[in-house]
Structure formats: structure tokens, C-alpha cells
């Protein structure tokens, strides 16, 4: 075993996690406690290994890299501690022996690289603020933590992907995007995907949002494995750029269109649609079109945070319905929680100014409070209180006040669960009467 390399590697790792690394001031030793180092204890059981270790330590001490101490009354037999010499020259030479660059140099290189890519981002975007915060941490702590690595080529590939996603308004399949960015169709999947997903998950959690599956996280950024499918039901005809028309009116229990077709939509022709209902949850969408949708109503499966391509699809639907002579109501049904409120406000702000919430009010929350879920997170409550004071969320103020008071939130599935249970109970009663 190369004892010099193993010991220096462990000491340098401890050094980079210490206050001495960030401040340059050694207030305590950077040391290994030998009784806790099982790998050394096991090696010293063999006389030859023990002799080699002691010779190595003596040489390292003569060269000014480390020092060590013996257990009481066991000098020359049982080690107590090994520590780095608290000197810049000793630290620098230790890095050279390991063939490594000081972590601070890597942090500085990444800091500068991020600065260049940060300029390509929208200053209002989540990715911009993420890099800004990360650069502050690099400057303060001087080492690279999670999300990025010591491999600068990989780091640049991650940054390229963040810039791509920040400006993307279309849909792109993973391997085609990988070819365009890295000249290798599998590079993203092998080297970048996991890191980018960890960043997307972090941003979701930071905003107290639920974290969806990996495929959906990437789809929100317009990156897909296969073309996305959009679901809706209602009396409308889609006119494509090649002049062909597709009539979906007869598909009363669910129609579909994929993103490749949606890209080629010239115009949407609704037939006397009086209301458009956007529904976040798939189960609620299926239940709604089977039990509540009116014949002159368009029901649209919204899903979570929509992708750029789905946003274009929603805009086409809105433009088609808006051009009718008859007035149209626009409604949205989501969970009564942070995610549901944000989904509603994004759709209203970006695409449908007339949008109004449906079954997302205080009365609904109270009517189904037995089905509600507790809010245990103080951070979640604080985020709710911030929305309460935000004019953009004014329509949810009353329900937010009730949520913070009772510390509850309601998933929209619970509403149809209750309806289904009540229907089953009624059927059971009718059966007993018969």
C-alpha cells in the first residue's frame, strides 16, 4: 500500500472541510486519530506493514509534510495521531505529492466559468439566481459542492444545458439536443442528465413545490424522449398548415394530439364553446369529462408546470376560443396548495388573462376538510403567507388564510374520492332496499 498517498489524501480531505481552509488560520490540528482509522489498525497487525508505515511517516516528517504522536508509554509501537504541518508550503507540497490541484483553484475556475454563462441567462430566471447563489458560495467556501464536479469539461456541459433550457421555447428530443450541444447524441444521458436533474429538483424544493418524476422535470424545460401528447375533450376542429382539418367533436370521452401535430396548427375552430376548463390532475380530468363536462364545454388536461410546447398549445386553444362571437369563461381546477396556486397564476399571467379558479376556494376547503392533508412544514407555511400578501394571488387570499389557520391543504383527487364514496354508499342503500 502507498501509505504516503493514503494518509495525505485523508488529511487533505479533512483540511478542505475545515475552517483553516476558508480562513487560512489553523486554530486546531488537521489530524487523523489512529484508533478511529480501522484501515491503519488492521495494517499494523502485520509486522512488515507496521515497519513500512513507520518508515513512511518518519520520511514524511523529515520532509515537513506531517507530524505524529505516540500513545502514552507506547513510543515506537502504537500511534496516537497524525497531522498536517500547519504551513502553506507543507499544504502546497502535499497537493503536489497527490498530483492534485488545491480545491480552491478548481472553485476559482468554476466561478469564472459560471460568470461567463450567467451573462447568457435571463436575469429574472431561476437558473440565473441559482448560479448567482452558487458563485457566492464558491467565493466564500472555496470548494465545489454538489451539482458540479472537479471535471471542468463536465461543468461546462452542465452550464450549456442550463443556458439552453433557459432560452428554450420549443420541444426537443433528448438525443437531438445532445447532438446539437455536445456533438454526441448520448453525451447528455451519460454525463449531464443526472446533474441537471439534481439542479431542477433543488429548485423545486427551494420553492416548496412537489418534485415530479424525472421525465416531467425535463419535459417542463422542453426536453423529451418522445413527442409530448396533449389531452382535451370538446367541440372543436383543428386546422393544420397543410390545409387539412381534424374534427374532435365526436370524441366525447377524451381526445389526443401530439406535439408534432400541434406545431403545425394554423388555427383552432371551436363550435360554440361557452367554457374552457383546465384541470391539473389526470384522474380529475378523466372523472370530469365523464361526469360533469357540458356538451358546449372544452375540458383540457393541464398537468403540472407546462412545457414550452404545451404552453403554445394552450395559447392556440385560447386564441381560437377568444375569437368566437359568444363570450367564453375560462376556469382552472388545481390542488388547493402552493403548487396549485402557482400553476393557476402562471397560466393566467402568461396565456389566459380572464382565467378564474374553480373549486379552489375557502368553501371547498372547508367542505372537504376531513379529506385534507396536514401542513407540517414551517417553511411551507411561510411560503403561503408570502402569497397571501402578493397582489397576483389576491383571488386566493381567503383560502390561504384558512389554510394557515388550520394548517391544511387539499389535493383535488380527494374531492372526487369523496363523490365516488358517496355514490357507492347510495348504491349500497338502494341495493339493501331492493
Image: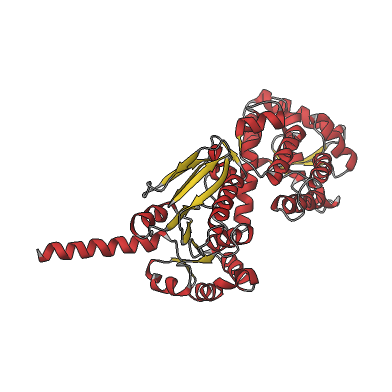
Could you say which quadrant of the image residue 79 lies in?
A: top right
Task: Please say if 429 is above or below 92.
Answer: below
Q: Residue 172: x and y, percent?
A: 62, 36
Q: Is residue 260 left or right of residue 374?
A: right
Could you say which quadrant of the image residue 264 lies in?
A: top right
* Residue at the image point whose x is 77% and y is 27% from the top: 55
Q: Is residue 266 left or right of residue 407?
A: right
Q: Quadrant of the N terminus?
A: top right
Is residue 310 visible to the viewer in this orientation of the structure?
yes
Could you say which quadrant of the image residue 384 lies in?
A: bottom right
Q: Residue 431: x and y, percent?
A: 13, 61
Q: Is residue 207 left or right of residue 63?
A: left
Q: Residue 223: x and y, percent?
A: 61, 39
* Residue at the image point whose x is 62% and y is 58% from the top: 207
Which residue appears farthest toward the right when viewing the image? 89
Q: Quadrant of the C terminus?
A: bottom left
| 433 or 111, nearer to the observer | 433
* Residue at the image point whose x is 43% and y is 52% from the top: 235
| 15 or 77, nearer to the observer | 15
Q: Residue 234: x and y, percent?
A: 43, 52
Amino acid at each position: 500500500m502507498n501509505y504516503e498517498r493514503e494518509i495525505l489524501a485523508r488529511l487533505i480531505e479533512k483540511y478542505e472541510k475545515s475552517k483553516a481552509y476558508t480562513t487560512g488560520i489553523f486554530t486546531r490540528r488537521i489530524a487523523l486519530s489512529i484508533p478511529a482509522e480501522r484501515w491503519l489498525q488492521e495494517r499494523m497487525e502485520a509486522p512488515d506493514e507496521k515497519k513500512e508505515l513507520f518508515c513512511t511517516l518518519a520520511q514524511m516528517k523529515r520532509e515537513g509534510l506531517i507530524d505524529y504522536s505516540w500513545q502514552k508509554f507506547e513510543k515506537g509501537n502504537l500511534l496516537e495521531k497524525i497531522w498536517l504541518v500547519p504551513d502553506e508550503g507543507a499544504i502546497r507540497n502535499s497537493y503536489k505529492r497527490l498530483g492534485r490541484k488545491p480545491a480552491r483553484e478548481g472553485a476559482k475556475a468554476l466561478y469564472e466559468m459560471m460568470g461567463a454563462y450567467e451573462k447568457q441567462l435571463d436575469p429574472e430566471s431561476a437558473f440565473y439566481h441559482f448560479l448567482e447563489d452558487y458563485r457566492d458560495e464558491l467565493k466564500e467556501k472555496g470548494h465545489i459542492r454538489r451539482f458540479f464536479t472537479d471535471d471542468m469539461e463536465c461543468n461546462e456541459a452542465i452550464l450549456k444545458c442550463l443556458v439552453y433550457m433557459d432560452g428554450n421555447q420549443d420541444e426537443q428530443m433528448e438525443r437531438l439536443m445532445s447532438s446539437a450541444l455536445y456533438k454526441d447524441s448520448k453525451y447528455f444521458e451519460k454525463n449531464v442528465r443526472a446533474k441537471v436533474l439534481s439542479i431542477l429538483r433543488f429548485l423545486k424544493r427551494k420553492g416548496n413545490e412537489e418534485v415530479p418524476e424525472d421525465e416531467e422535470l425535463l419535459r417542463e424545460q422542453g426536453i423529451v424522449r418522445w413527442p409530448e401528447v396533449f389531452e382535451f375533450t370538446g367541440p372543436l376542429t383543428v386546422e393544420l398548415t397543410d390545409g387539412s382539418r381534424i374534427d374532435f367533436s365526436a370524441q366525447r370521452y377524451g381526445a389526443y394530439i401530439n406535439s408534432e401535430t400541434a406545431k403545425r396548427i394554423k388555427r383552432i375552430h371551436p363550435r360554440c364553446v361557452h367554457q374552457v376548463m383546465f384541470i391539473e390532475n389526470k384522474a380529475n380530468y378523466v372523472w370530469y369529462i365523464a361526469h360533469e363536462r357540458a356538451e358546449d364545454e372544452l375540458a383540457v388536461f393541464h398537468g403540472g408546470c407546462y412545457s414550452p410546447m404545451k404552453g403554445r398549445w394552450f395559447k392556440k386553444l385560447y386564441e381560437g376560443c377568444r375569437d368566437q362571437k359568444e363570450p367564453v369563461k375560462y376556469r382552472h381546477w388545481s390542488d388547493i396548495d402552493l403548487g396549485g396556486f402557482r400553476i393557476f397564476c402562471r397560466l393566467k399571467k402568461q396565456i389566459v388573462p380572464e382565467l378564474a379558479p374553480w373549486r379552489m376556494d375557502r368553501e371547498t376547503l372547508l367542505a372537504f376538510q376531513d379529506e385534507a392533508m396536514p401542513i407540517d412544514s414551517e417553511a411551507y407555511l411561510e411560503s403561503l403567507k408570502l402569497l397571501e400578501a402578493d397582489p397576483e394571488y389576491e383571488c386566493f387570499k381567503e383560502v390561504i388564510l384558512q389554510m394557515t389557520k388550520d394548517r391544511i391543504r387539499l389535493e383535488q383527487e380527494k374531492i372526487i374520492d369523496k363523490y365516488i364514496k358517496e355514490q357507492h354508499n347510495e348504491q349500497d342503500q338502494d341495493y339493501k332496499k331492493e
